[in-house]
Amino acid sequence: MKLTYLLLLSALFFSSSFAIANDSKTEGSVDSEKILADPESIVIGKAKFSSLCAYCHGPEGSGGKARKLQGRDDLTSDYVFTTITNGKKRGSYNMPPWKSLPEDLRWKLTAYILHLSEKGR
């Protein structure tokens, strides 16, 4: 009887753990194209850029300790998103990885940065 009860409890625990794990959002689960096309994403991305990125990249991406982002024509959405996610090391400068930010927010930062590259041309 105890063994049956323990097996039943174990099965319930593992099945509920599996369901919870499958409910959580995984990388790639957001619609990046929709986020990039939404003007509200640029507004949200700008606010986050001001708090996380402007210290090195300058206000509105004008440059500073890190590279200028305005007017750049070499930036793609995948490159910007990957760089935000994984960070970058260039010489003695290190950009920290921001993979702790929710994926949709990293895409909104990407939208703002791409907006900066178009704005500065």
Image: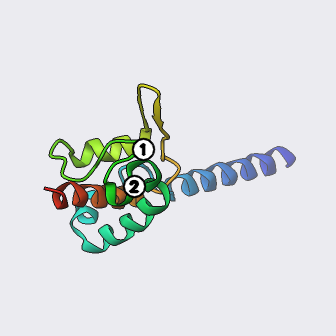
User: On the rendered structure, is 4 left or right of 49?
Assistant: right
The residue shown at (30%, 61%) is 112
User: On the rendered structure, is 72 left or right of 3?
Assistant: left
Residue 66, quarter of picture = top left
User: On the rendered structure, is 88 left or right of 19?
Assistant: left
Q: Position of residue 93 (x, y in %)?
A: 45, 32
The quarter of the rendered structure image containing the C terminus is bottom left
Q: From what the image shows, is residue 110 above or below residue 67? A: below
Instruction: Confirm or deny contact between disc 2 and disc 1 (CB under 8 A).
Output: yes
> How far apart are labels 2 and 1 at the CA level?
7 Å
Residue 106 circle label: 2
Q: Which residue is mark 1?
A: 85
Q: Position of residue 90 (x, y in %)?
A: 39, 29
Q: Is residue 45 visible?
A: yes
Instruction: Identify which residue, 53 or 18, lies in the foreground.
Output: 53
Q: Secondary structure at mark 2?
A: helix
Q: Position of residue 24 (x, y in %)?
A: 51, 57
Instruction: Identify which residue, 1 or 66, lies in the foreground.
Output: 66
